Image (cartoon, rainbow, N blue to C red):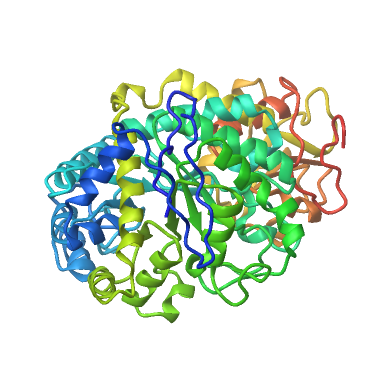
Amino acid sequence: MLLVTVLLAVAGCTAPRGPTARPSASGAASAPSAGPATGPAAQARAIVARLTDEDLVGQVLMPYAYGTSATTVSAGSKSGNQRLAGVDTPAQMIAKYRLGGLILVGFSADDPTSTTNPTTNVDSAAQVRDLTTGIQAAAKALPAGVPALIGTDQEYGTVTRIKEGVTQLPAAMAFGAAADPALTEAAWRAAGAELAALGVTVDFAPVADVLGSSGAGVIGSRSYGSDPAADATQTAAAVRGLQAGGVAATLKHFPGHGHTTVDSHTDLPVLTQSRAAWDSGDAPPFTAGVQAGASLVMSGYLDARAFDPGVAAVFSSKVLTDVLRGQLHFDGVVVTDALNMAPAQKYPPGDAAVRALNAGNDILLMPPNLGAAQAGLLAALRSGALPRTRLVDAVTRIVTLKLRLAGTPQPAMSTVNTPDHLAAAAAVAAKAVTVLRGRCSGPLVSGPVSVTAAGGGWSRQRQWLADALRAAGATVVASGGTAIHLVGYGDGAADLSAGAAVTVAMDAPYVLGSARSATLVATYSSTQASMVALAAVLAGRAPAPGRSPVAVGSLPRTACGTP
C-alpha cells in the first residue's frame, strides 16, 4: 500500500505529489519507491517500525469520549465513559487503548432533566481549547509519542459542532449561491485558523456530494449544489482555505451521497448511477478536492451498484482501492463514516473494524464498542486475517499526517472570532442572498413590518433580523404590518404562512416552490450574518446577487439577472 508523502496543504500550497499507488491484480495497492531519508514520511516509518501490536491498533481507532475536560468530567460523563470503554475520562481512554485520536461531539451523557446543564465536548471556545490541550498531553505520553488527531464535524450550517464563541460560516449551499471561490477560500481559511487555535486538527468537511433531484433532501444545504463543475470549484476552494488555516480537510461522503433518498444513518442507500454518470456527475468535486491537496477522504455507507453491488463503500476495496486510490489517485488518509451507524451494525464491532481496515480505510471512526473493536483487530492481526502490512500502511499514513500538522504552530486564542474573520463570513452571506420572486431594486417591504416563523420558532433569527431591519431604517412591530416569514431546517410546506408578503428560506430553498408570497428570498443559512445580509436586501440597502445552486420547482434560479 502507498505510504503518504503528501498530505497537507501548508500556507495555501501543496508540496509536490509523491508516486501514485496503482491497484494490483489482488486489489491491493503497490508501494511506491522510498521517499527522502528525512521528513515526516520517513520519520513516520521509523516511529511505526517500533510500535507494538497494541500501539498500532490504537492509532487507527478514533472514538468519542464524554466530558468538557480530558481529566475532570461530570458524573454523567464518567458513567458514559465507563459504558463506552471502562474508564472515567477521555485521558484514561487514550491511555488504556493507546488511541491515535478522538472526535469531539455535541451530545452529552448527563441527565437532561438535571438542574445542571448537560456538558458536551464543545460547550465553548475556551473549553474546547482546554479539552484538546489535555487530549494532546495524554497522547504524547503514549509509546508512539506523537500528537493525537482531534476531529469534529464543523461543516457549518445544519452540521456545526462548535457554536459558541467562534465565527460561524454560512451553510455550504450559501457558498454555492454566492459562486465566488475567492470568498470561499478566504472564509474557510478563517475557519481553519480558528479551529487550529482551539486545538482541532481535522475537520470532517467539506461535503463534496453533488445533489441530484431525487435525493436532494437527505444532504440538502450541506452540499454546494447540483452542478458538478461548480461544486468542484467550491470544494477545492474550501480545502485550500481550511488547510491553509492549519487544519486537515476531509472530503465526504465518498463516492457521493447526493442522489440518495435514504439516510445512511438508518439504512444503506443504493446508488443506481452508471459508471459513466458517476464519472461526470459525482466524481468532479472529489477529484478537485484531491487535486487541491485534501488530507482525508471519508468513506460512506453507500451501495454503489456501478462499483460493488450490495457492499457499502466503507467495506468495499473496489470502491476505496480501485476507484479512490486507483482512479482518483488519492494518497492520503481514508476515514470511515461512523461505525456506530445502522449499516455497520450487520457485523459485530470487531468484525466491522477488520472489514473496514481491510477494505482500505485507515481510521476507524466511532466504533460502537471500543473494546470489541480493539480485540477484533488484534485477533485478526495475529491470525493473519488482517495483514500486518495493511495495518502498518494505515498507521504510517496517520502518523505522517500528524507530523505534518505538528509542523504548523498552533494559533493563539486571539485568532478566534476576529473582525476580519467575521467579515469573511459576512461577505459570503451577503453575496448568497437570492430573490427567486419579487422586485430586484428598492425596498422589498414597506411600512411597518413583522417577523414571523412557524410555531413561533427561530427566535434568535427573528430577533437578529428585526434588529438588523431597525438598523437599516425599517419600522418593526410585534405583529401585523407587512409579514416576513422565516422557514428553516426541518420546516416544510405546512410551515409556510399564506398571508406573508415575504417568505425566506434559511436552509435549502425547495420549500419556496410551495410558497404563495409575492416575494421569495433564499439565504440558505440561518447565521446572524445571513440575517443581517437579508435585512439589507429587504430594506433596499443592498442587491440580491445570489443564484440558487439547485432547481426550486418552476421558479427561476434568480429573479434578478440571469435565471
Q: Can residue 2 be seen at all in this image of the molecule?
A: yes
The quarter of the picture where the C terminus appears is: top right
| Residue that appears at 66% across and 60% down | 217
Image-based side of 225 in relation to 142, left or right: right
The quarter of the picture where the N terminus appears is: bottom left
| Residue that appears at 57% across and 52% down | 456
Q: How many marks?
A: 0
Percent position (x, y) of residue 286? 60, 47
Front position in the image: 460 or 427: 427
Q: Can residue 198 be seen at all in this image of the molecule?
A: no
Residue sitting farthest toward the front: 33
Percent position (x, y) of residue 541? 71, 19
Percent position (x, y) of residue 196? 35, 33
Front position in the image: 372 or 193: 372
From what the image shows, is residue 316 above or below residue 71?
below
* Residue 412 lies in quadrant: top left
Image-based side of 450 in relation to 206, left or right: right
Image-based side of 72 in relation to 245, left or right: left
* Residue 561 lies in quadrant: top right
From what the image shows, is residue 513 above or below residue 449?
below
Front position in the image: 366 or 526: 366
Front position in the image: 155 or 17: 17
Percent position (x, y) of residue 11? 44, 23
